[in-house]
Image (tube, coloured by chain):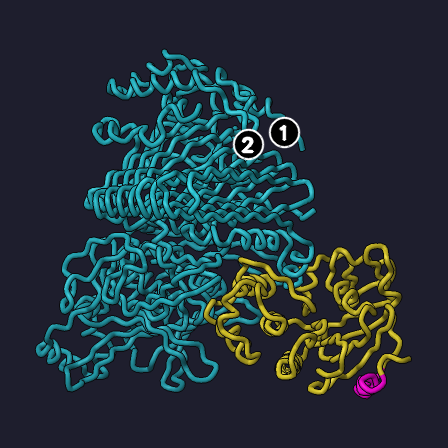
Chain colours: A cyan, B yellow
Amino acid sequence: MAVNVQDILAQEDYKQRYGFYTKADYVDFEKGLSEEVVRKISALKNEPEWMLEKRLLGYKMFLSKPTPKWGADLSKIDYNDIYYYKRLKSKEGTKWEDVPDEIKKTFDKLGVPEAERKFFAGAEAQFDSGVVYSHVNEELEKLGVIFTDTDTAVKKYPELLKKFFGTVIPPTDNKFAALNSAVWSGGSVIYVPKGVKVPMPLNAYFRINAEKSGQFERTLIIADEGADVTYIEGCFVEGTKVKTREGYKTIERIAVGESVETHKGDYRRVYHTQTRPYDGELFTIDYYGDTTQQIRVTEEHPLLAVRKRRAEYSNTEFSPSWIAAKELAKGDYLAIPIDRKVTSNEVLTFEIKRRSRWHDRIEMLNLKTDKDFFRLVGYYLSEGSILGKDGHSNYVSFTFNKGEGKYINDLVSLLEKYFGKKPLIGKEYKNGISVTLSSTSVSTFFAEQFGRGAANKKLPTWALNESAEKQRELVKGFWRGDGSFMYKLYAAGAKRMFRMNTISATLATQLRDILLRLDIFSSIHVAKRSGNRQPMYVVYVGGDNIPAFVGLIEFFSSETVVKENYSMKMLLDFAIRTHVVSYAKILGNYAFVPIKAITSERVSNLPVYNFSVEEDESYVAAGVAVHNCTAPVFSASALHAAVVELVAHKNSHIRYVTIQNWAKNVYNLVTQRADVQENAHVEWIDANIGSLVNMKYPSVYLKGKNAKGEILSIALAGEGQTQDSGGKVYHFAPNTTSRMVSKSISKGSGLTTFRGLVYIGKDAENAKVNTTCDALLMDDKAKTNTYPYVDIQRNDAMISHEAKVGKISEDEVFYLMSRGIPESDAIAMIILGFLNDLTKVLPMEYSLELKRLIKLDMAGSVG
Amino acid sequence: MNVMKLEIKDLHVEVEDKEVIKGISLNINEGEFHVLMGPNGSGKTTLSRTIMGHTKMKVTKGDILVDGESILKMPTDKRAKLGLFLLFQSPIEIEGLGLLNFLNTAKASLQGNLPFKEFMEEVKNDAKSLHIKEDIIGRSLNYGFSGGEKKKVEVLQMQVLKPKIAILDEPDSGLDVDAVRVVAENVNDYQQRAKAGLLLITHYSRILNYMKPNFVHVMVDGKIVKEGGRDLADQIEKEGYKF
């Protein structure tokens, strides 16, 4: 398919086609570039004089440099037809209705949540990254790290910028670097002080920038001696969609969007079933309080946690931070978030579908959902069952122990109160007494809302966020039915605990969550039972949580105490009680539980799964950014010319990750360079998926001895796209090493080109260079080129270059399909296998996203 | 319970414009153990690939049915979902695609997601009974595996994916005596456990020393020339394909 470049490029046409912005939305700026425009940008930003001078120099250089002709065709760029600075006047951008269907469909495919779509589509200009941002910033501030947008940095840290800005990439470097120097806007500045290792990847997502157009960002990262930092540039989308969300739950919603299924009835626990092949250390973390859960994470994966302070005492201070799994140790505390939101309903109306032999009809059931009602719910969850033939619900029945007369009376009056019908009290049978209400609508109500059959019991969403008062009654009712008190005397003291049993895993976790809301920490233990019986989940409360629970269930007036005469023992026990302290602490919105065991194993190509809430929590750190990359970024401008400068001082390490997914109308011409000093290490990891023409060759200048540079790049060229990428390594000092690995995939009229430049200076004794470049062609039409350039000033360098071109074969696809894998998945798997040694260095979330993008973009049929 | 039925009716197949299969009819039911023997180049592998739906195998005449319905228009993955499986004579190597990841994806698409722990246990147990070294299952799919390892991993895939009817294309070729026995025992075990239907394609009767097939078919030049029981295999062992 031929792409009419002219069409897509023309600014006006693009706007019309996509219905995005109109001129009126912007602060007035003319198209085209002049000294006046440069001055105006600087003035609008209130910049100091020195920055204006840099801009003007950039402008001069831009005029004097020709558009490069050695690479992709750039002759279609009309510099006079571009806005160089834009700022939205109004807060409103595009109307959602105006977003083209094609784009909406993409969002559907990706499962991007509704609120985020508007942001991606440009329909929402204002945002607030709220909690996450401030939290991360606090952490960084403590470490002395500067992480801010470049405009702010110019004002706040002028000395730092004067010293480094434009030193790695001077405006004289090339036409587009010069252009960026003249009109730059946005971007990040990071400074990491001596010896500081930033524990989590810093993400572009955290940047706050109200400007919609980010096509000339300027990024500067300085790692001082011995510092370590990873920066991830999600597709240049400024800001995030955290706005509509509360705290950390948002992330779980994204996770729900990603994984196809959510756990039924429990909106907080989202189970990822996605996998990615992973090579490296896999950590397994067991924590106190829930033997049913285990966290398995990759080594870099950050978890919200608190370090144990002293060896022999429990912590008294808890201030959680993100800690990578590999940095965690036994005894450190994991933070489990507590959902404290309260939504209370006095009355609820339920639709009851009644099936009859002749026709189905809907009956409305109005219920006063007050606190007594919740006690009734507790009774149902523990002792209730539904009876009826052929899946119909005709009777709801409760079974109590004959000694529990008080509860039976309570139940009978509750049923009468809420449903206006007297239940039938059965005769004693095997020490049990049953209470049965014959009502199709009532039994259907219980079955639908709270589950039918003991293993399926659950709480509906509306009950999970109810007020404390009502939830206390629910727990009380449940405990009366399925609760027990365990008391044992040991030589070392007494062991006491309250237990509640259920065979529903969902209900067990829901009960635990409700108890957390009531500031009571409970543990879940799963007990295997003999034969074919389902495992029993035991929710138990012990230690210093006991007094609160005793109060809640009104233990001393309970039937258990009356029967077993526990009261004396209890009193005695309280008297001799020493310091029984729970290992877990509830503070604010978190429960802190110590890690019981942490083990790691070396795995290779293992599919990694995510489980549990804690795991989802960790997505707060990076997960949101995932969608930044998934959604194509619709830029109003066809030219994107960013500049990224890295300065790695002695012994430092910088890893810079970019996943570029610009809309397919964009010229992406980016200059990235790193100044690498003695013994320092810089990694560029670069995935190029979007844009019409991409030209990007991250480079490393190895200036100090033993310096090391790595450039890993992935390029996907679909129909009509040109991915011209690679890297440049300059060896200026002795014993310097570099590695360039490029993997490219092209399809249809897509073209991938690898350019690798190797320079060995006359002082670069014993330099080592390794270059690998693999290309995969999806069909017979697709093309790929490789251009290695080598300039060597001495003869002791070790240089290796490897290039391979392959094509996906029908036999490969047939083999995978013969195992039940659909064609598009099979192709995606082969591509990902091809990319594996690069994707495995990406953080997990990005790897997952890349996988999805590949499925969307590449996995058509093999021709 | 209904048993799955695979029927091949007067099948003619061309590969790159050359007729390789020249009218074959064969019925295989779940639970039955068939052996297909024949000299090199008789079309055995073409038949197996055609059953599984390789796009290069063009059916010019005849039909393949599962439970009475034609599957000729069905893509390969859908055939696998019906319960068909092909053990490849030369399994494909895919660098970078982890064996476990692949197997897990395949299992999930055939049977839905399984808790990871259970899946791992199953794979490990099956690998153990096949004497597959642990490090093999952590590696890329067939990449750099020895011939024997590849065949064993094919059997492992069958055990994990649990087909109703499996076509085993020379599971014994290139294996040493011990490996042949291990493969045979595992196939037997699977067949009995799952009551699966088998179509075992082989060149030699060596593997049959460990197995008890119900039917033996002999294929020469794209046609079935002789059918019989176990003793037919013994006869071929002694006399070769002289009919």
Is residue A650 or residue A560 the one in the foreground?
A650
Task: Tell me the residue that label 2 is attached to.
Answer: A692
**Do callouts 1 and 2 point to residues on the same chain?**
yes
**Whole-percent x, y for residue A433 in the image:** 37, 80
Q: Nearer the viewer, residue A773 or A407?
A: A773
How far apart marks 1 and 2 lie (CA) works out to: 10 Å
Rendered image: mark on residue A412: none
Residue placed most toward the observer, A308 or A37: A37
Q: Residue at x 62, y 80 (%)?
A: B179
Mark 1 neighbour class, 10 Å CA radius: few under 14, some 14 to 19, many 20 or more: few
What residue sits 43% from the left and 16% below the top?
A64
Image height of A341 relative to A162, above or below: below
Q: Which residue is mark 1?
A: A3
Residue appearing at x 35%, y 55% in the figure: A300
Magenta span: B228-239
Q: Main secondary structure of the magenta part?
A: helix
Tell me residue A252's x, y (percent).
Answer: 39, 51
Q: Are marks 1 and 2 in contact (CB under 8 Å)?
A: yes
Q: Is residue A440 visible?
A: yes
The spot of residue A654 in percent (x, y) is: 33, 44
Query: Taking A802 as reference, is A708 left or right?
Result: left
> What secondary structure is found at the residue carrying circle 1?
loop
**As drawn, is A335 to the left or to the right of A685?**
left
* Image spot of residue A570 (x, y percent): 15, 78
